[in-house]
Image (cartoon, rainbow, N blue to C red):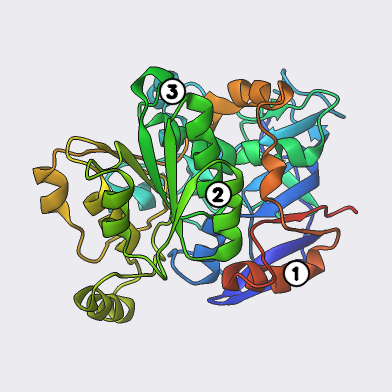
Amino acid sequence: MKALTWQKKGKITCESVPDPVILDGGDVIIKVSACAICGSDLHLMDGMMPTMRCGDILGHETMGEVVEVGKDITRLSVGERIVVPFTISCGACRQCRWGNWSCCERTNPNGRQQAETFGYPLSGLFGYSHVTGGFAGGQAEYLRVPYADVGPIVVPEGLEDEQVLFLSDIFPTGYQAAENCDITPESEKTIAVWGCGPVGQMAIRSCFLLGAKRVIAIDEVPERLAMARAGGAETIDFSHQNIQETLVDMTEGLGPDAVIEAVGMEAHGADTMMQKVGSALLSATTLERPFALNQAILGCRPGGILSMPGVYAGALGPVMVGILMNKGLTLRTGQTNVQKYLKPLLERIRNGEIDPSFVISHRSANLEDGPALYEKFRDKKDNCTKVVFRPHG
């Protein structure tokens, strides 16, 4: 089969690789009908995630048709169309029973290695390095799905692939980020969102679904800012506006009640000359740059909530922990507990409350276009906001 593979930092290629096979009774094999490039995949492309190996198959936003089932599968059948969560969860350990699906204690075969850095093992992830299990990803013609009776959701008739594909990651991720802000219609909250990439866009719309009064979106890419405004947000272009001063002005000195940091480890941007000097030093000395995180800490009102879906892999440059503490902010973060949100968000899609396909800008029926589209997405060229592949045309 064809698959998009990581070769080395900055190099993604389309290769012919062996078809996946059933390895365990709880596995299924799907024929991938749609898959996408996630912003988190760009961290892999840029060499930000350790333990990637030459030839690793990428991708964790995937759906398709079940073509083979393991002997222990009871919930899925050949021919069903399913969306696959990017987190691989067993459903039986204490973390899964608590609803902390992304903290599953059993699904990462390299959990001991992960615990050396994180203290404890976390769930396996598709296509996201060997420290998260070394599972092949879904930017391919076929995918093996372990623990398939636990994670995937069957797609009902009448919904197109593009409407439901993002249940695999970015829609639940944005929704969890918004939910972490304790939004209710009665609270009349103002939420500021750093980063208007795909997760930020889903977070903006999720804030409104939950009842936010205002959402202020922060970015510098014109098409992303336009998309945020189309979703009802007010915007700040940090290439022309000082973020903190503008937030204070827009909220009459009160500040946003909660902030969402949807940028992560490869943030860029600084307001002051001192910050710009620090930015240059950090870029040269550390993999991860917490510029957006620090701006979010500064921008949130005292006693507010900082929700952080932005991805980080390890040690950070200087973080404003003192400001976080002195302002009494509540920090909420973590990989997304996708399984928790699949049914309720599918219902929102079926009810017409949201169509997540709005974020798609580029489509391809050929995985061989993948390397060029990875570069276009990374470099934000040609108004590229989200790429979806149909590997079988």
Residue 385 in percent (x, y) is at 64, 59
- Position of 243 relative to 125 (above/below): below
Of label 1 and label 2, which has the lower sequence position? 1
Left or right: where 150 falls relative to 251:
right
For label 2, the residue is 228
Q: Nearer the viewer, residue 319 or 241?
A: 241
Spatial separation of the CA atoms under disc 1 and disc 3: 36 Å
For label 3, the residue is 99
Q: Is any part of residue 75 visible from this angle?
A: yes
- Position of 192 relative to 183 (above/below): below
Q: Nearer the viewer, residue 215 or 327?
A: 215
Three-letter amino acid code at disc 1?
A: Cys
- Position of 36 relative to 176 (above/below): below
Secondary structure, mark 2, is: helix
Badge 1: how crowded within 10 Å, few (<14), some, or many (20+)? many
For label 1, the residue is 14
Of label 2 and label 3, which has the lower sequence position? 3
Q: Residue furthest right?
A: 393
* Mark closer to the observer (1, 2): 2
Q: Nearer the viewer, residue 322 or 123?
A: 322
Whether residues under marks 2 and 3 lie with C-beta atoms below 8 angstroms apart, the answer is no
Residue 347 in percent (x, y) is at 66, 20
